[in-house]
Amino acid sequence: MDNFDRQILALLQQDATLALKDLAEAVNLSTTPCWKRVKRLEEAGYIRGRVALLDAERLGLGLSVFVQIKTQHHDSRWLARFAETVTAFDEVVEFYRMSGEWDYMLRVVVADIVAFDRFYKKLINSTEGLSNITSSFAMEQIKYTTALPL
């Protein structure tokens, strides 16, 4: 990966709808070499997809909840079942296995406390072996970005 590739990735992180002509001009390449670089970056897995970022508030999904989970199980079979269960919940937008005090962390996006309570009940009723769950409600989003530091 060279400086052209990094510039292309930085620009696409800001706006994936950029026309190829505009992208090529911005990085001082002609369109064909720029297109080939974008294709190579996609094929190599640097570009995993192109999406629209939606406004959760406008969609009535203004509550972000960070859920920390401890479990009694640490074997791969249990983790596979747990991961399959949790990833099936549309409300879960991020899911991590953690080091430290908590085993897993989820970011859950819902409309309100009532919707979170429904999610919470679905989670605990669908998963065996959870020993402790704590939830923290985001009061204000101060920074959010999908752009990686290049």
Image: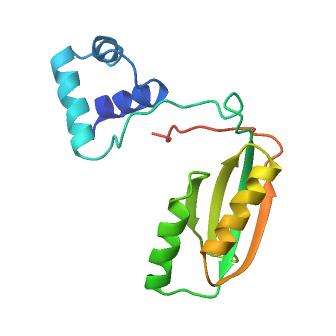
Which colour style is shown?
rainbow
| Left or right: 13 as drawn, with respect to 123 | left
The residue lying at 21 percent from left, 24 percent from top is 35
- Quadrant for residue 80, please give it: bottom left
Measuring from the top left, give residue 138's x and y in whole percent: 79, 48
Q: Is residue 98 above or below residue 88?
A: below
Q: Assign the N terminus to one quadrant of the image.
A: top left
| Left or right: 106 as drawn, with respect to 116 | left
The residue lying at 48 percent from left, 76 percent from top is 81
The residue lying at 49 percent from left, 78 percent from top is 79
Measuring from the top left, give residue 63's x and y in whole percent: 75, 44
- Quadrant for residue 102, please give it: bottom right
Q: Is residue 90 above or below residue 19?
A: below
Q: How many marks?
A: 0
Frontmost residue, 11 versus 95: 95
- Quadrant for residue 111, please give it: top right
Q: Is residue 80 above or below residue 122?
A: below
The residue lying at 51 percent from left, 37 percent from top is 147
Frontmost residue, 76 versus 127: 127
Q: Assign the C terminus to one quadrant of the image.
A: top left
Measuring from the top left, give residue 22's x and y in whole percent: 34, 12
Measuring from the top left, give residue 45's x and y in whole percent: 29, 47
| Left or right: 112 as drawn, with respect to 19 | right
